[in-house]
Amino acid sequence: MSSVMLVTGSASGIGRYVAEAYYRAGHRVVFADRAAAQVRDICAALAAEAGGEAVPWALDVRDEQAWEAAITDTVSRWGQLDLVLNIAGYLHVDALLSAPLAAVHDHLDINAKGVIFGTLLAARQMVRQPHGGHIINVASLAGIAAVPGLTLYTASKFAVRGFSLAAAQELAPHKVAVTVVCPDAVQTPMLDLQVHRAEAALTFSGGRILSVAEVAAAIEEARQHRPLEVTLPRHRGWLAKLTSLYPPLTTWVAPYLRQRGQRRQATWQQKPG
């Protein structure tokens, strides 16, 4: 059955891949991103394809009024809002002592407040629908285990995960499900920002870099089964939860993980393109 979906961050990376995949599967999709020209071009290119309906929408997730307008337009257009995917994200790589104060605002405004606005305002629409709805928020394993070197990013993703887990409990009686998806490092433009930055060595400490297709598959599984939380890969999720359960463990394993990350980061730097 065709669903009505709004996907943030749909101009690139995970958001674009997911939005296009759902469009091609026959769903009605709002491609939402503050990069208005890019989502217009994406939707124009998709227009000739058979499948669902695609609508570009210029959305700055930091703006609650912009969120209200996007949701109102979606419901006016299609009569409902079944799924919101909060995927838009921000990362500024810098050591904490060197980070500009503006980066504090940007991390929390985009990564945390953007998700909170989207969840809250979508939920207010969904509770009025007989069938409810589903909200999927993309956090990170950095939202489970602290990542020194990406401290501001960690703070924002901890906020996303904590908010999502609490919101899920409040909204469940209203037939609105909330799932938080926490992936390890993914091959996206955000990863490119980290390749040559020593502060980001821990990003590369996993066995491999995830593809956007793998994250999209996890999101689709979450859409089907509506779990509270998804981590991927699963073994890294358990390691993150273990270090979160006993924070001193981080200080013991971080040097080893950093060294492994530095080696793999150096290999990644040598890749063409």
Image: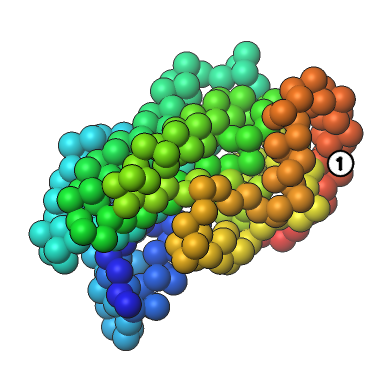
Nearest the eye: 201 or 18: 18
Residue drawn at x 82%, y 48% is 264
The quarter in which the N terminus is drawn is bottom left
Task: Say left or right for 37 vs 135.
Answer: left
Residue depicted at x 74% and y 23% = 247
User: What residue would you read off at disc 1?
Assistant: 260
Residue 108 located left or right of residue 62: right
Number of numbered labels in the structure image? 1
What type is the residue that disc 1 sits on? Answer: Arg
**Image x and y of residue 212, in percent:** 57, 61
Q: Where is residue 201 drawn, in percent x and y?
A: 75, 37
| Residue drawn at 62 percent across, 13 percent down | 97
What kind of element bears circle 1?
helix
Residue 179 position within the rendered picture, expressed as x and y whole percent measured from the top left = 47, 49
Q: Is residue 92 above or below residue 172?
A: above
Choose top left, top right, bottom left or bottom right for residue 163: top left
Determine which quarter of the picture holds residue 7. bottom left
Task: Give the crowd class for mark 1: few <14, some 14-19, many >=20 residues within 10 Å.
Answer: some
Q: Position of residue 142 (x, y in %)?
A: 63, 36
Give the residue at x 16% y 66%.
Answer: 78
